[in-house]
Amino acid sequence: MPLASEVLQALRLGLPEDVRVDQSVETRAASSHDTWPVATKLAALDEHPYQADAVVRLESFDQVPSVLRVASQFAVPVTVRALASSVTGQPLPVHGGIVVDVSAIPATFEVNEQNMTVTVTASMNGGELEDCLAKRGLTLGHSPQSLYRSTVGGWIATLATGQFSSFYGGIEDLVTGYVVVLATGEVVELKASPRAAMGPDLRQLFIGSEGTLGVITSVTLKVFPVQPMCLTAFALPSVEAGLEILREQALVGLRPMLLRLYDADEARHAMVDPEFASPVLFTGTCGPQALADVQMSLLTDMATKRGGRDLGPDSVQAWMGRRFDFSTVENLLASEGGYAETIEVAHNWDGIQQLYHELKQVLAPLADEVLSHFSHVYTQGTSMYMILLGKAPSNREALERLRTIWSTTMQVCLDNGAELSHHHGGGLARSPYSRRSLGSAHLVLEKVKAALDPAGILNPGKLGL
Ligand SMILES: Cc1cc2nc3c(=O)[nH]c(=O)nc-3n(C[C@H](O)[C@H](O)[C@H](O)COP(=O)(O)OP(=O)(O)OC[C@H]3O[C@@H](n4cnc5c(N)ncnc54)[C@H](O)[C@@H]3O)c2cc1C
């Protein structure tokens, strides 16, 4: 539906002439897909059910307040789109309106080597920032598989986490402050400081809000010195043995930078060896060399006492080299009838094994391969990935299969009291389950939303809002 002429007029008044309010069919169709496999299959079928009425590609975050004020005044939905690496349909404009594309906003950053922080424009590509920091011997410590295809603002909006989270933590541990534009156009700074006890920690409010509460324009993140690493892999007799190691190392206070426990099905891929027949644990420690070594020696003790066999560093080193590669999934999705899905969930130690076995069983008939690994570990539990690869007779059937995979997985997680997402977020994929997942806490989200976004313009249809 085209935007009403008074909305168009008001938008144009607040924007420089060269910022187009693009209502072309092609641009609207292109912004109706992200990297969610369901959206990818819809694109392959030339179906665009989640279309904006217009796309505005901003040149500066200074242009956000005027767009939001107009949208609030006319109650037009606004969905922010960065690099659209979301794998859950988060940036899809399910209720139409305006897509605000921030991906082309020029980014700058400033490092404070005394406080060990970097302040960066939210549109900055994460990989580019990491490469710039590396030249100074620094790292963000945040290394999602999508590092080179996602923005810093996107990380905050999605509560992202990275492959080295056991050492550095998730993005919620790495952000120290940021600037956000509210739906009503006010610009708010959540100040960067080590810690503050002046009321609730408001900095947590917008982290993971998926563009439903405000538009993040600038972010301050911690940075760390790059440290030596120690890597090795252990072949293990069972997933259970691996889970015990993950739990024990967390309880005694080790801080490895890498922990990836693959079940036997995924171990074949991780080891790039179709004959590999047991679960495998990839580990890495870092720090001053003596500390990295002693942590690795303790991990080795924990693995060997459970029947683990040290395979040396080669397979982990090879994985480090290809850790941003997504081609298996992309190639499968690009083929007629091919489908692939990665669903990450989380559970406590007392429920994770049951959840793993149940999901493996119910998902087995839905794909050619059901792979699983555990990779973000806490004292009370862990995240778990289920990865499904399959080939259906047609793209239409692949799409149906993907939808069944989602509904089946979400139901099993709800039945087991598990968390529906560890870090990919709610998006469109999980929005229908938001209320059941959050329970009575969903009321808080609804009230915060009503207070901060009274016209309900920001990314409606997500997080059960
Ligand atoms: C191959 C692959 C691997 C991945 N691996 C990981 C991983 O290891 N860890 C992980 O956490 N995620 C991973 N993801 C998911 C994805 O990369 C993250 O969710 C990422 O944080 C999204 O960033 P983006 O810039 O692409 O945002 P988009 O996908 O464009 O948007 C995501 C959501 O954030 C909102 N948003 C974006 N920018 C802003 C802003 N400035 N202000 C307010 N809201 C905003 C959007 O409205 C939308 O709701 C992976 C995805 C892919 C394709």
Image (cartoon, grey):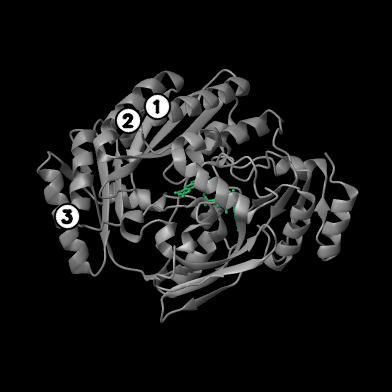
Q: Residues within 10 Å of mark 3 (few under 14, many from 20)?
A: few
- Report whether residue 320 is seen: yes
**Residue at position x 54%, y 60% in the image:** 152
Front in this rendered view, residue 41 or 98: 98
- Report whether residue 272 is seen: no
Give amino acid for label 3.
Val
- Label 3 sits on a secondary structure element that is loop
Front in this rendered view, residue 83 or 175: 175
- Label 2 sits on a secondary structure element that is helix
Label 3 CB-ligand 1 distance < 8 A: no
Instruction: Check contact, mark 1 vs mark 3: CB within 8 A.
Output: no
Q: Which mark is residue 252?
A: 3
Q: Quadrant of the C terminus?
A: top right
What is the quadrant of residue 452 in the picture? Answer: bottom right
**Residue at position x 9%, y 43% in the image:** 305
Q: Residues within 10 Å of mark 2 (few under 14, many from 20)?
A: many
Residue 250 location in percent, x, y?
A: 22, 52
Is 263 located above or below residue 126 in the figure?
Answer: above
**Residue at position x 51%, y 51% in the image:** 158
Sequence-first disc among 1 and 2: 2
Front in this rendered view, residue 338 or 420: 420
- Residue position for label 2: 355
Distance between the alpha carbons at the discs numbered 2 and 3: 25 Å
Instruction: Check contact, mark 1 vs mark 2: CB within 8 A.
Output: yes
Residue 420 location in percent, x, y?
A: 43, 37
